[in-house]
Amino acid sequence: MSELLEITTMKSRDLLQYIDRNLFIGKVIVLYGTRRAGKTTLVQHIMDKHSTLSTKYFNCEDLITQQQLGTTNSEALYNVLGKHDLVIMDEAQYIEKIGLTLKIINDTYPHIQIIATGSSSFDIANKLGEPLVGRSRNFTLYPFSLKELNYDFIKLDSNLDNILRFGLYPTVVEKTEEEAKEELMNLLNGYLYKDILELEGIKHSKTLIELLKALSLQVGNEVSYSELANKLGISVNTVIRYIDLFEKCFIIFTLSAFSRNLRNEVGIKSKKIYFYDLGVRNVIINNFSPLDMRNDVGALWENFCIVELIKKKANSRLFTNNYFWRTYSQQEVDFIEEYDGKLHAYEFKYNEKAKVKIPKIFTETYDASVEVVNRSNYYRFLL
C-alpha cells in the first residue's frame, strides 16, 4: 500500500513563533484546536525549547489533576505550581471554574507562565469568560497547512489528490491509505462525536450525526436551516444549535454572504458550510474514492482552497473577515477575504481548463479583482 505522505521528522508549526513571542509578558496563553490537531505536541516543543526553566505538564482529563487544580485557593495552587516557571494545562476545560483558577494564578503569581489548551472552543471559552479579559492571548491550532508540510512542489503536487481524500491531520498524513481510514474513523467516533455529545448533555446522537452527514453533502452550496429541520424532523432552533456546536468543536465553519450595495445580492443571512478537514468530511460520508471516480471533486477543491487560505492567514496572525458573494440571478464569487480595508476575491476550479466567468458587476461595484485558483496554480495562493 502506498503512503499518503512521508513525514520522517516532526513538522514545525507556524504558530510556534507567535506563541513564543507572547510568553512571559504576564498573559495566559490559550491554545484552542480540535483533538489530534497537534496541541500536545506543540506545547511539548515549547517545553523542550525552554528546558532550562522549571516546567510542569498537567493532563486535565486526569481526576487527580482536576482535584489539584480545581480550586480558587491561592495557597493551595501555589503548593502545586509555585516552584514552576512554565505550566501546561492540557485540555483545561475539564477543570472546574478554570477561568477563576487562571485569573488567580495570573494575578497572584505572575512569574508563572500558563499555557492552557482546549479542544472545544466554546466550552473552555465559556469557562474562561470574564475572568481572563485582558489577561490572555488566544491562538487556534488547525490540522497541518500545506506550508507546514514543507514539501517541494513536485512532492506536494504528487500527493495533492490524496490530501483531498484524507485531509491533513498530523496522525493521518503519516499513514498508509488503510491506516489513514482507520485513524479518521477513530478520530470521528472516539473524539469528535464524544466531545459534541458530552457538551450540554446532548442525548439525540442519531439526529446529530444525520445532520452532520447532511451538511457533508452540501459543501459549497447554500444551506437552508428550515430544509434541514424538515428533513430531520427537528426544529430550526435545534439545527442552529447543533451547527453552532459543530463549529465550536472545530469540525465545520460557516461563511455568510457579502452584501453591501446591490439590491440583487443575497442577504447576509445566507450561509455556506465547509469542513476544517476533508478527511473528516469524507469519513462522515464514508467516501474515500479516488478523485476520478467521484462527482464531488468541485466541492472538495473549493473546501480545500478556502480552508487553506484560512489556515494561511490565521497561522500568520492576519485576521480577516471571510464571505462568499452571490446574486439572485446566480452570479457568484466563491470566497472573499476582507482585510486592510480591501476585498480579496477568489474563484476555485479543480480543472485548469474549466471556463470561469467573473461577475463584472462585482468587480466594478467593489473595485476588486478575482483570482482563479486551479490545479495548476494553487501553490501561488495557498503556500
Image (spheres, rainbow, N blue to C red):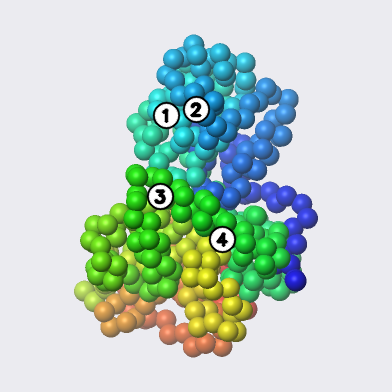
CB within 8 Å, label 1 to label 2: yes
Query: Could you tell me residue 209's position as x and y percent?
Result: 40, 62
The residue tagged 3 is 197
Q: Earlier in the sequence, mark 3 or mark 2?
A: 2
**Amino acid on which disc 3 is placed:** Leu
Label 2: few (<14), some (14–19) or many (≥20) C-alpha neighbours in 10 Å? some
- Find disc 1 in the rendering and name its residue: 96
Label located before the other in sequence (4 or 3): 4
Inter-mark Cα distance, 3 to 2: 21 Å
Label 1: how many Cα within 10 Å (few below 14, some 14–19, many 20+): some
Q: Position of residue 25 (x, y in %)?
A: 54, 27
Image position, residue 93 (x, y; %): 46, 36
* Residue 17 picture quarter: top right
N-terminal label among 4 and 1: 1
Q: Are marks 3 and 1 in contact (CB under 8 Å)?
A: no
CA–CA distance in space, label 2 to label 4: 29 Å
Task: Determine whether, in the image, residue 330 is placed left or right of residue 87.
Answer: left
Please report the residue visible at 24 percent of the width from the left and 70 percent of the height from the top.
Answer: 230
Say which label, 2 or 4, has the lower sequence index: 2
Dot label at residue 66: 2
